[in-house]
């Protein structure tokens, strides 16, 4: 029987609106679920797509110095030896001998002793602190029941090949980055890219996380949007600053996240990943507190050097202009799509008290990322109003995801659209049949204006 991982209670409202309104469902629900797996429903998938498209636009299409890639999830297992993931990609694990709960020791110690306490602590030191303090298990409350902390490798193992004898033990990739390093030489030789330039990729990654109970914040299957920016050694500091500013600017001006919910935090030396000489996280103020949204790391020439060593291939870059040959340095902005999803829902979520005493739940998404751009309502289901509404729907659908809704009172239809974050609702009434105008209601202010049908598509286009 699978042990259930209960969700963080601070996320209750977010989880509830996501389920109620078709954004996120628990995975394998009709079979009792599979903990920490989630399926994205009709509105969730639209929101994910919009975030990915907006990232691709700003990190690939609008940049003359970045190209895209889609590499395999399954890679030769030597890749992970070379990258250091086989020996270093671990989290410290303790078990409660009484109730069998598995706990990430560093996070547990930070819950007990304060943020940052576990930075740089060795396993031995963690064991000492746990013993000295005789902490109680957060699950069963018993004291003195923890096992010694040990390294737990986060990579998922699987088997590649049909027959047992020939099958190769491989891993599901824990980051998309390595597929980019493996193709560095291919991209240089087939696209004649000159350094500095970046390779961007969106794809699934897998980590067998020890503690995964913050909804889609930390899951075992997730999607990443990563970019490896290759530059000349010595220029990485400038590029690092450029990308931190570029990412922050994208979050506030394009995705529309409020500035006060974002901050940049530089990693302490002891916290740095094994491949990084410097990392800054863009953090978001989640319901449970500040947490990592986007990691920007200065990966030096570590990965390309390692792959040269393990594969025997020359991965140096020939700089024709300056007549130099070198292994490029890398700056990497790495963002989780699902974590961004959680941040935008939390940022947009509001329970608003209305003058009539009622409360409405509204998701104030920027129109650029809203899952539904506009909803079209016939006032009544008769007298030609549905036909006229469908005509308008078909015309506006050329712009993006539009919804047609003729069910229930207009007030109820507005509330439904508020909860999924639709910025505009368009009502077709009896006046429409006379003067060819419609009422457009704006989600945030709830103000209404009359707009000619002939200009509606342009009006909406300008606001998206
Ligand atoms: N290639 C570098 C790398 O993967 P990371 O900081 O481990 O760096 C990058 O991951 C981003 O991926 C994080 O900032 C976060 O947004 C997302 N991420 C990492 N682990 C995750 C998980 N278990 N669930 C959801 N998102 C995750």
Image (tube, rainbow, N blue to C red):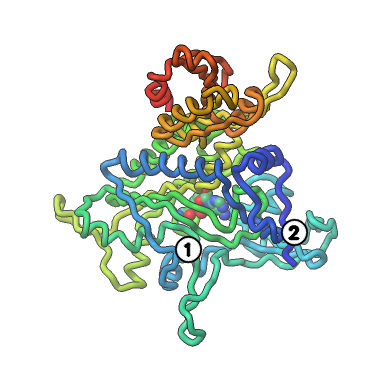
Q: Is disc 2 placed on a helix, strand or loop?
A: helix
Q: Residue 288, can we see it?
A: no
**On screen, residue 220 above or below 229:** below
Task: Check the picture and name the quadrant holding the C terminus.
Answer: top left
**On screen, residue 137 above or below 155:** above
Residue at the spot 45% in from the left edge and 27% down from the top edge: 392
Q: Which residue is mark 1?
A: 173
Q: Residue furthest right?
A: 142
Figure quadrant of residue 398: top left
Local crowd size for mark 1, using a 10 Å CA cut-off: few (<14), some (14–19), many (≥20): many
Q: Which residue is mark 2?
A: 130
User: For the image shown, how many numbered marks are present on the structure?
Assistant: 2
Q: Residue 21, can we see it?
A: yes
Task: Check the picture and name the quadrant holding the N terminus.
Answer: bottom right
Q: Is residue 50 left or right of residue 304?
A: right
* Residue closer to the observer: 73 or 152: 73
Q: Residue furthest front?
A: 383
What's the CA distance linking mark 2 and mark 1?
Answer: 33 Å
Q: Is disc 1 placed on a helix, strand or loop?
A: loop
């Amino acid at each position: 029987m699978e042990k259930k991982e209960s969700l963080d209670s601070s996320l209750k409202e977010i989880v509830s609106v996501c389920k109620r309104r078709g954004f996120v469902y628990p995975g394998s629900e009709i079979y009792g679920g599979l903990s920490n797996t989630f399926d994205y429903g009709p509105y969730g998938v639209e929101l994910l797509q919009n975030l990915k498209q907006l990232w691709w636009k700003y990190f690939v299409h609008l940049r003359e110095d970045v190209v895209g890639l889609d590499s395999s999830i399954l890679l030769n297992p030597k890749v992970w030896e070379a990258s250091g993931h086989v020996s270093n990609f671990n989290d410290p694990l303790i078990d409660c001998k009484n109730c069998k709960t598995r706990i990430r020791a560093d996070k547990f110690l930070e819950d007990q002793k304060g943020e940052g306490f576990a930075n740089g602590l060795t396993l031995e030191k963690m064991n000492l602190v746990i013993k000295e303090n005789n902490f109680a298990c957060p699950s069963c409350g018993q004291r003195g029941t923890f096992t010694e902390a040990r390294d737990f490798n986060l990579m998922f193992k699987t088997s590649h090949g049909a027959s047992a004898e020939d099958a190769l033990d491989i891993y599901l990739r824990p980051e998309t980055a390595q597929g980019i390093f493996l193709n560095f030489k291919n991209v240089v030789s087939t696209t004649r890219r000159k350094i500095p330039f970046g390779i961007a990729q969106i794809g699934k990654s897998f980590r067998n996380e020890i503690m995964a109970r913050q909804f889609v914040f930390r899951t075992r299957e997730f999607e990443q949007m990563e970019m490896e920016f290759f530059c000349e050694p010595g220029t990485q500091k400038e590029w690092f600053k450029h990308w931190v500013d570029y990412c922050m600017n994208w979050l506030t001006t394009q995705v529309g996240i409020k500035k006060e919910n974002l901050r940049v935090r530089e990693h302490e030396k002891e916290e740095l990943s094994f491949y990084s000489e410097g990392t800054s996280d863009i953090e978001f103020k989640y319901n449970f507190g500040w947490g990592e949204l986007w990691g920007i790391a200065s990966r030096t020439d570590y990965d390309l050097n390692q792959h040269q060593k393990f594969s025997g291939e020359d991965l140096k870059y020939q700089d024709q202009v300056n007549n130099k040959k070198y292994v490029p340095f890398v700056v990497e902005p790495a963002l989780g799509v699902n974590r961004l999803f959680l941040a935008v829902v939390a940022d947009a979520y509001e329970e608003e008290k209305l003058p009539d005493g009622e409360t409405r739940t509204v998701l104030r998404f920027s129109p650029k990322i809203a899952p539904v751009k506009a909803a079209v309502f016939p006032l009544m289901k008769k007298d030609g109003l549905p036909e006229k509404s469908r005509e308008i729907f078909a015309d506006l659908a050329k712009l993006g995801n539009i919804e047609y809704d003729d069910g229930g009172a207009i007030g109820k239809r507005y509330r439904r659209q508020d909860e999924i974050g639709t910025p505009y609702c368009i009502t077709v009434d009896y006046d429409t049949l006379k003067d060819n105008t419609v009422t457009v209601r704006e989600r945030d202010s709830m103000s209404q204006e009359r707009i000619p049908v002939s200009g509606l598509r342009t009006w909406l286009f300008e606001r998206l």
